[in-house]
Image (spheres, grey):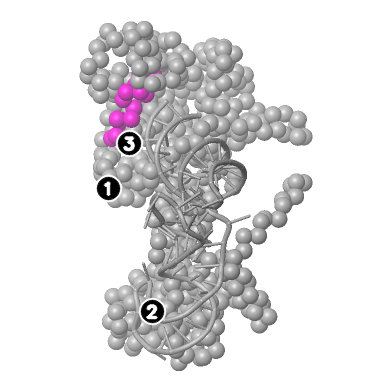
Amino acid sequence: MSEHEQTAPALDENQIMAERRQKLKAIREQGVAFPNDFRRSHMARQLHDAHDDKEREQLEGEQIEVAVVGRMMLKRVMGKASFATLQDGSGRIQIFVSNDKTGLEQHDQFKHWDMGDIVAARGTLFKTKTGELTVQANEVRLLSKSIRPLPEKFHGLTDQEQKYRQRYLDLIMNEQSRDVFTKRSQIVQGIRSYMVDEGYLEVETPMMHPIPGGATAKPFVTHHNALDMPLYLRIAPELYLKRLVVGGLERVFEINRNFRNEGMSTRHNPEFTMMEFYEAYSDYQRMMEMTEGVIQKLAKDILGTLHIQYQGKTVDLSKFERLTIVGAIKKYNPHYSDEQLHDRAWLKEEIARLGGKPVLTDGIGGLQLSLFEECAESQLWNPTFIVDYPVEVSPLARGSDKHAGITERFELFVVGRELANGYSELNDPEDQAARFLAQVQQKDAGDDEAMHYDADYIRALEFGLPPTGGCGIGIDRLVMLLTDSPSIRDVILFPQMRAE
RNA sequence: GGGUCGUUAGCUCAGCUGGUAGAGCAGCGGACUUUUAAUCCGUUGGUCGCAAGUUCGAAUCUUGCACGACCCA
């Protein structure tokens, strides 16, 4: 506990809770209220998989003894016998409790147990008249008394805020929610195995940075007492991962949290998960191939198809289109002429007309990018790599050998959202130093998202960074895409919320 | 930051042109030995988000605030 002692929470007791506390008190007086000596023999899913297709008579002949546990989600008491539905980590199984088998006393106790209680049952499998696999209990036990009532059994938990704030309730009540987070785990596992198969090494770099870097974003600041210095929660791991490539770890990746002190929306959470990966002796073309490859592998392995559904529309992951910024603008806005798209004054006017942010950079490429964001980005539904990013918004990317002012950089867009960002890395230490200085000038001019000058990173580059390709993939947004979730909060177990 | 909608019992929701609070589920008591959101009878439970205003009287009308959802920036 901190030195600021937490005040006792306001008592939000109600009649139901008072009654349940009374029941718990009675249980305590009878013995161990929260026993931990019951061991299950099977999960619900195992039993269904093994016995659902058996006939009643067959099951009766086999006399299969099982021990099951779970949270009581439904209860139907009929005098001398009762049914209840237990939910465990794999699914649900029905139990049948009767005076005949458990005796009058246990059944009477059972009748007073509540929805949400954690219950154990030991008995024989049978099938009811309607063919539902059920455990006929010889013994039932209460393992954990639930004090707070669960949401209403039919409608469940529908309040979005409560789903986010009390995720455990969402997980108890909503199978779809359990499914999303199961898939999230599978996605992360799938990415790991893909990267390892490609010869990448998983690493962990600092979450607390003395100089925030690797992206243009506002950081969270904290303070280290012993060192008496400010530290920044990282906005990106990029500069550390490239230090590792300097060190000879030629293929590295990291899946971890980034923190950005910015607004929140259905696409932004202050902390979010990114995978970044770097490969020496490769370039942005290879990074696009890797990005395409890993996303396709995940869709095939986890969803079984490359034609997935997102918010009622199909997304075709079988081919990833490639367009330049200008090419994308013209594809969705054929009425713009080449002259207009290379006219600074016209571009500024058009961006303002479309309601874009005031443009900070004055370069033609930066203006084109702003126009792209206003008039094309949201229309990129099927996966599209946008290439040819201007150097002034890409301070860490290698310049193109062919076109001045353009970098070897791409961003991937799917369902109108940015999903990945990669480039051939800038490995010229003098060029990088100059770019940092330009960023510092922008920062001095009032752009608080501009980068700092990172002298240690320049020192690392001066030892020689091999030609390298690098890429970051937003894991939360990828999970949104693959689980058909409309909000980033639906794929983060505990999304950031205003204090209650 | 702007707009729209919302906040009523533990949960899901009604509540009209202002007249002092309702249902279903959950709970409690009773009936019921194959139920499936079990059913049937009875019953407890409310600072109507918070504050101010209008009014004889506000869940209802007005204003402000808080929180949330969605859309926009």
Q: Establish whether labels 2 and 3 are both on one chain.
A: yes
Residue at horizontal 72%, vertical 52%? A7
Of all chains, the one bearing label 2 is A
Q: Is label 3 in a helix, a strand or a loop? A: loop
Q: Which residues are drawn in magenta? A: A369-384
**Tag 2: Cα neighbours inside 10 Å, few (<14), some, or many (≥20)?**
many
Q: How many marks?
A: 3
Give the residue at mark 2: A134
| The quadrant where residue A260 appears | top right
Label 3 marks a residue whose chain is A
Q: Which of label 1 and label 2 is nearer to you?
A: 2
Disc 1 and disc 2: Cα gap in Å?
Answer: 35 Å
Query: Which chain does tag 1 point to?
Result: A
Q: Nearer the viewer, residue A253 or A144?
A: A144
Element type at marker 1? loop
| Amino acid type shown at disc 1 | Thr
Q: Earlier in the sequence, mark 3 or mark 1?
A: 1
Say which residue appears at 32% left-offset and 36% top-offset: A415
Residue kind at label 3, given as amino acid type: Val
Residue A305's disc number: 1
Q: Determine the secondary structure under disc 2.
A: strand
Question: B41 or A258, which lies in front?
Answer: B41
- Kindly report the distance in space between the C-alpha atoms of the residues bearing marks 3 and 1: 17 Å
Residue nearest the observer in this picture, A7 or A121: A7
A274 relative to A129, above or below = above
In magenta stretch: residue A476: no
For residue B32, above or below residue A446 = below
Q: Residues within 10 Å of mark 3 (few under 14, many from 20)?
A: many
Q: Which residue in the structure is indicated by mark 3?
A: A415
Q: CA distance from mark 2 to mark 3?
A: 45 Å
